[in-house]
Amino acid sequence: MIATLSSQRLRAVTGSILFAFAATHLLNHALGLVSVDAMEDVRAWRVAVTRSLPGTVILASALVVHIVLGLTKFSQRRTWRLSSVELVQLAFGVTIPLLLFKHIIGMRFAHEMFGVNDNYIHALHVLWPGFAYTQLALIALVWLHGCIGIHHLLQLKPWYRRFRPVAFGAAILIPVLAYAGFAVAGREVRLIQDWQQPLNDRQYGQLLEMMNSSWWAYV
């Protein structure tokens, strides 16, 4: 019982950390409705935190622990009697890494391994429009999974009942604005003709191999 409670708390803490990261990431995307420069200005502040040594350790640890605890809970289930909300959260949670690992490798690993400046100009050239639907799927999976988890975490808090209408509005608006900003900025950045792929064929092949290996390893 104690171990179960501890794992639940740890899953809640790691999930909250990841949700905060996702929320700020999506809000950063939403600034594409203003300009790519605005996206970059906020990104500089965001990555100063998330890519610092403490930020990297906290995020990477939260991601690994949350996935392991989630899969452990999934494997220990004794019944498939799930509510529709539980089923959605479970299915989305299991699916997220299939898309997320490729995104992390394509951006953060490219930066760390080969010195790629994975700013929004680079990211949007790589992702728009070829991976537009993949990004839409990843945003939807991560956000809905996180919102369900946060709702379960807060639903017994007395103040949450009063805050729910605001939370519901934010839960709808944030991903919509994020994808709209991503799309608008993507169209703007594609007009830049002098952009060149910073990776050579060997480096690109290495990243693709890592993406495929991570996909199969997780499966």
Image (cartoon, rainbow, N blue to C red):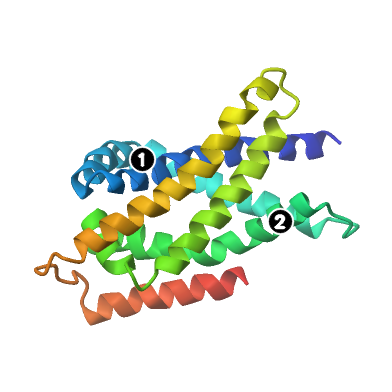
Residue 183's spot in the image, x, y percent?
A: 34, 58
Q: Position of residue 174 (x, y in %)?
A: 47, 42
Mark number for residue 218?
Answer: none
Whole-angstrom CA distance, mark 2 to mark 1, is 34 Å
User: What residue type is disc 1 on?
Assistant: Leu
**Nearer-N-terminus badge (2/1):** 1
Q: Quadrant of the N terminus?
A: top right
Find numbered disc 2 in the image and state the secondary structure of the residue it sits on. Answer: helix
99 and 49: which is toward the camera: 99
Does the rendering let one see residue 137? Answer: yes
Under mark 2, the amino acid is Val
Tell me the residue that label 1 is attached to.
53
Q: Around disc 2, counting alpha carbons within 10 Å, would you say few (fewer than 14), some (14 to 19), or many (20 or more)?
A: some
Identified at 27% across, 38% down, the residue is 42
Residue at position x 79%, y 59% in the image: 75
Which residue is farthest top? 158
